[in-house]
Amino acid sequence: MKKFALTFLISVILLTSLAHAEEDKGLFFGGHGGFNVGAFYFDPSPFNHWLSKAGINDVPAIVPVFGLNGQVILFRKIVIGLQGNGFSIDRNGSYLDTNINGGYGFVDIGIAPINKKHYLLTTTVGLGGAGYNVWLKGDLVKFKLLPESSSDLSGSNNRGNSSRSTDLGWSYLVTHLGVSFYYGIPFTNDPDSYGNVLFGISAGGIIQIFRTEWNSPELINVGTLPTPSFNGAYLQIEIQFGGGVTSDPMKPPTYDIGTEKKEDEKSAPKTPAQDKPLSPQKTEPPKSDDQKQKTDEQPKSEDQDRDKGQGTDDQPGPKK
């Protein structure tokens, strides 16, 4: 369990580092669900010790599991999940056959530290139920689960006459701690919609809170029955299908007027006259007739002054 806890912690740290890998948005409202296959680790030693008397081979500590699971994402960060998994193991002995099946299911709540278009990381904690069911068929008298009076051939290996069957069960209230990482492949190009096929990997631990037992009232020596626990861990791969929206549908869109005006000016076609800057032009008020007359007379007065300064042949100018 220490190795599993260390691996679990390292995985969370590495996956959290992807939080800034993308700037795109993930689910705001939505969810995903699908199926999973994986492995469940538990302690089968109580079963193995009990069934070894009938020559039944040991049950492995790691068994394959399969099931369904899904999650709902609210406000981009809140996660509500459901999960259910089961397994089944068959074993044969010299005078007894058995099938051990078990399962677990949880209701989870947690957070999504990473919620992007292509990446989703969730951590959850939950409460649920679990259980084992053991089906036995064979010489239950020889196995000392039935009294000798229940069979005329007690102690015989002939299953044709002494074969009986019965069920035993153990139920548990358990708590659950898990982490899931998904990589999504979008199948929509709408930036406001979320539609992904997700491939994920999940890991978690299961801790037993309390246990109850049940069995047939005709059985004897029930005090010798095993008392297995449901403490364990799982690792599974998942294929999920998700959908939802990437932004708050109740929030009205916001517009930047200044930005829109600049964009409109950029997008509007320019005319040649707009390309050249307009230089200011000076305008003069119209002239009156008197002003025009003075303008016409002004050169003459200048000529007369010049003539006065230089003089003429008839009238000599001032002596030098």
Image: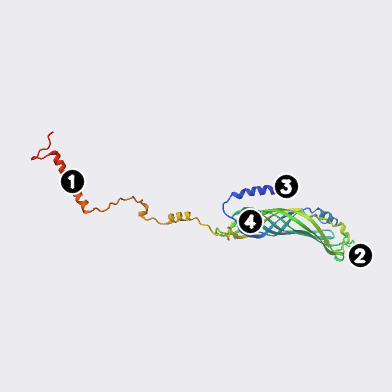
Q: What residue is shown at x 19% (from left), y 51% (from top)?
A: 293
Residue under label 2: 149
* Whole-number angstrom distance, CA of label 4 to CA of label 2: 57 Å
Tag nearer the camera, 2 or 3: 3
Crowding at label 4, few (<14), some or many (≥20) Cα neighbours within 10 Å? some
Which of these two is toward me, 142 or 197? 197
Tag nearer the camera, 1 or 3: 1
Indicate the position of residue 22 as horizontal and vertical percent values.
57, 51
Indicate the position of residue 67 as horizontal and vertical percent values.
70, 60
Q: Amino acid at mark 4?
A: Phe
* Whole-number angstrom distance, CA of label 2 to CA of label 3: 51 Å
Residue under label 4: 199
- What secondary structure is marked by label 3? helix
Mark 1 / mark 3, whichever is N-terminal: 3
Q: What residue is shown at x 79% (from left), y 56% (from top)?
A: 210
- By what rule are the colours in the image chosen? rainbow
Mark 2 / mark 1, whichever is N-terminal: 2
- Circles 4 and 2, Cβ within 8 Å, touching? The answer is no
Indicate the position of residue 269 as horizontal and vertical percent values.
40, 56
* Whole-number angstrom distance, CA of label 3 to CA of label 4: 25 Å
Tag nearer the camera, 4 or 2: 4
Q: Is residue 223 visible?
A: yes
Residue that extends furthest to the top in the rendered view of this protein: 320
Q: Amino acid at mark 3?
A: Lys
